[in-house]
Image (tube, grey):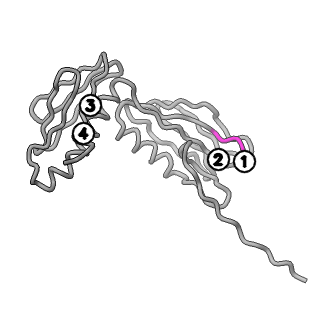
């Protein structure tokens, strides 16, 4: 039995969770999210807790999905109450980020600006628009209710220019560590 799957999910005040068959819907101060649970997993609301139950203990797939379904239900409950945030940084001389008409515009060393459509329900807050030298990065944060959609959008942003190992230029998460390599050593000719 999954240790994560056994843990009950506490419902914060102001959040309402409804279960109809295999369909779970959570609504809170930020909005509402819904998902379908796998047919072999059962979800019950018990007072101020949500319990995810694996009815088929011997089924291998049900065992595997027990913890996953519990984590997904916990994410929608937390998403409608608090939301999620990913902080990102851009390193590199002359690199910048702006928001124009529902699009995120990135200037990251290509001959053209890269435009990414911001998905519905996700907000971008830019703290520092452009890099200053190699030491001060451009900073922005991406926030939203849906953890899966937020993570995918952040990954798409990072994919535009992943950090390179020699100078560390590129787009990265704020808490990401970029392992650096030593460049070529020049032999003195004589």
Where disc 2 sits, the SS reads strand
Q: Which residues are magenta?
A: 134-138
Q: In the rendered image, which quarter is residue 40 located in?
A: top left
Where disc 1 sits, the SS reads loop
Q: Contact (CB < 8 A) between labels 2 and 1? A: yes
Q: Earlier in the sequence, mark 1 or mark 4?
A: 4
Which is in the foreground here, disc 1 or disc 4? 4
x then y, percent, for residue 83? 39, 28
x then y, percent, for residue 122? 41, 32
Q: Is residue 153 left or right of residue 49?
A: right
Q: Main secondary structure of the magenta part?
A: loop
Q: Residues within 10 Å of mark 2 (few under 14, many from 20)?
A: many
Q: Quadrant of the C terminus?
A: bottom right
- The image shows residue 85, relative to residue 29, as above or below, that is below
- Name the residue carrying label 4: 70
Q: Which mark is residue 102?
A: none
Q: Residues within 10 Å of mark 4 (few under 14, many from 20)?
A: many
Where disc 4 sits, the SS reads helix
Q: Residues within 10 Å of mark 3 (few under 14, many from 20)?
A: many
**Residue 30 magenta:** no
């Amino acid at each position: 039995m999954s240790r994560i799957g056994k843990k009950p999910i506490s419902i914060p005040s102001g959040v309402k969770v409804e279960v109809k068959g295999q369909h779970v819907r959570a609504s809170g101060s930020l909005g509402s999210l819904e998902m379908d649970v796998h047919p072999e997993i059962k979800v019950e609301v018990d007072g101020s807790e949500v319990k995810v139950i694996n009815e088929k203990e011997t089924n291998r797939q049900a065992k595997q999905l027990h913890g996953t379904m519990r984590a997904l239900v916990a994410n929608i409950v937390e998403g409608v109450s608090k939301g999620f945030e990913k902080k990102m940084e851009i390193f590199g001389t002359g690199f910048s980020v702006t928001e124009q008409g529902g699009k995120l515009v990135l200037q990251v060393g290509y001959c053209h600006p890269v435009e990414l459509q911001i998905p519905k329900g996700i907000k971008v807050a830019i703290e520092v628009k452009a890099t200053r030298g190699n030491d001060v990065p451009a900073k922005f944060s991406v926030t939203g209710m849906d953890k899966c959609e937020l993570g995918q959008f952040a990954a798409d942003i990072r994919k535009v220019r992943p950090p390179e190992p020699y100078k560390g230029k590129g787009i990265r998460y704020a808490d990401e560590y970029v392992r650096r390599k030593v460049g070529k050593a020049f032999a003195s000719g004589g």
